[in-house]
Image: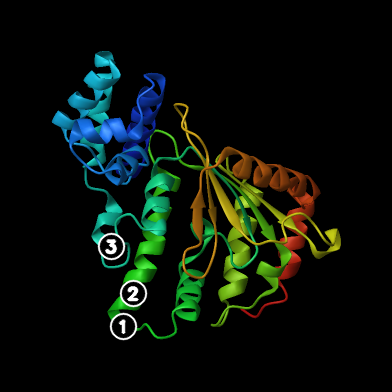
């Protein structure tokens, strides 16, 4: 079963779509049966809306799939549960790209990513996170700024999730580490934090750095994250951007970016070579 409300809704929608297609029922026919719009069926099947129990029963009768009821009703219940990010409703509009991504991230088993603009969010120190938020939101201050920072740090709870933390494979472009952050010692501390991860050999976090020496490569289009899930859910990719980027689930698009990431991953610094490199970079910054 899914482990976050957003993922539960996605799993429920995926299964309802699979059952509908297996039964040879058109979307318009399902909408007629529920006496609703086609867009509502689409929202249910894409996980943006949670059907009520009577609606699930109606659809399962139409699809001739009564045996699926128990699992789907459970998923619907999970999809309506509260999550930690609900407390940030003023920052995360329900159904927005960022809201969906954070919800999916909470239930993912693995994230593979390439970062070309900043240190990956889940691997940021508090001071670096503060510098990033302040730089990207110059018009925001006071309590609003503090809430943005707190939300960013609260996302890191997936690193301590029970029974299994989120596994991370993070490829960071050298430019990220060479770009100073405002504030004394911020970058030195951040690079030192990454060094600690590499030196300790975390079982759930692996970091590599793509050095300038590699030259041109297949990831010049920008940063992205690929979320993978247990229980057969398909991967999702988030293209990063100033305003949240966009989510994509088409298998060919996800696969193409995963292949490029795998190729660059093999060219990146790792192990002792990476540790030595990170220490050299840290020494270029003031205390």
Q: Is residue 269 above or below residue 181?
A: above
Provide the secondary structure element on which disc 2 rests. Answer: helix
Q: Nearer the viewer, residue 284 or 70?
A: 70
- Left or right of 241: which side holds 170? right
Q: Nearer the viewer, residue 128 or 218?
A: 218
Q: Which residue is mark 3?
A: 88
* Residue 22 appears in the picture as rendered: yes
- Left or right of 31: which side holds 53? left
Provide the secondary structure element on which disc 3 rests. Answer: helix
Say the numbered circle drawn on residue 142.
1
Cα–Cα gap, marks 2 and 3: 12 Å
Q: Which residue is mark 2?
A: 146
Q: Is residue 89 above or below residue 138?
A: above
Give neighbour class at mark 2: few <14, some 14-19, many 20+ (Cα, 10 Å): some
Of the numbered discs 1 and 3, the one sitting upstream in the chain is: 3
Provide the secondary structure element on which disc 1 rests. Answer: helix
- Residue at horizontal 48 percent and vertical 37 percent from the top: 109
Of the numbered discs 2 and 3, the one sitting upstream in the chain is: 3
User: Where is residue 172 shown, x and y percent of the image?
Assistant: 66, 58
Give neighbour class at mark 1: few <14, some 14-19, many 20+ (Cα, 10 Å): few
**Pointer 1 and pointer 2: residues touching (CB < 8 Å)?**
yes
Q: Nearer the viewer, residue 155 or 65?
A: 65
The residue mark sitting in front, 1 or 3, is 3
Cα–Cα gap, marks 1 and 3: 16 Å
Cα–Cα gap, marks 1 and 2: 6 Å
């Amino acid at each position: 079963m899914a482990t976050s409300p957003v993922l539960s809704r996605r799993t429920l929608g995926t299964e309802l779509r699979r059952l509908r297609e297996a039964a040879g029922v058109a979307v318009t026919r399902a909408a007629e049966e529920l006496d609703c719009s086609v867009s509502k069926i689409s929202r249910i099947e894409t996980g943006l809306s949670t059907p009520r129990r009577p609606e699930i029963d109606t659809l399962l009768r139409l699809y001739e799939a009564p045996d699926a009821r128990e699992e789907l009703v459970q998923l619907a219940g999970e999809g309506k549960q509260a999550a930690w990010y609900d407390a940030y409703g003023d920052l995360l509009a329900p159904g927005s790209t960022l809201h969906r991504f954070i919800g999916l991230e909470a239930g993912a088993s693995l994230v593979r990513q390439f970062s070309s603009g900043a240190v990956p969010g889940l691997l940021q120190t508090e001071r670096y996170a503060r510098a990033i938020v302040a730089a990207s939101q110059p018009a925001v201050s006071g309590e609003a700024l503090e809430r943005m920072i707190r939300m960013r740090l609260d996302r890191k709870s997936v690193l301590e999730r029970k029974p299994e933390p989120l596994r991370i494979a993070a490829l960071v472009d050298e430019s990220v580490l060479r770009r100073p952050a405002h504030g004394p010692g911020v970058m030195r501390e951040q690079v030192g934090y990454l060094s600690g991860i590499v030196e300790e050999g975390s079982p759930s976090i692996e970091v590599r750095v793509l050095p300038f020496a590699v030259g041109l490569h297949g990831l010049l289009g920008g940063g992205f994250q690929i979320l993978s899930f247990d229980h057969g859910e398909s991967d999702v990719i988030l293209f990063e951007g100033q305003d949240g980027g966009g989510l994509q689930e088409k298998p060919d698009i996800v696969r193409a970016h995963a292949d490029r990431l795998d190729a660059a991953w093999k060219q990146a610094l790792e192990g002792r070579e990476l540790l030595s490199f990170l220490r050299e970079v840290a020494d270029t910054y003031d205390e």
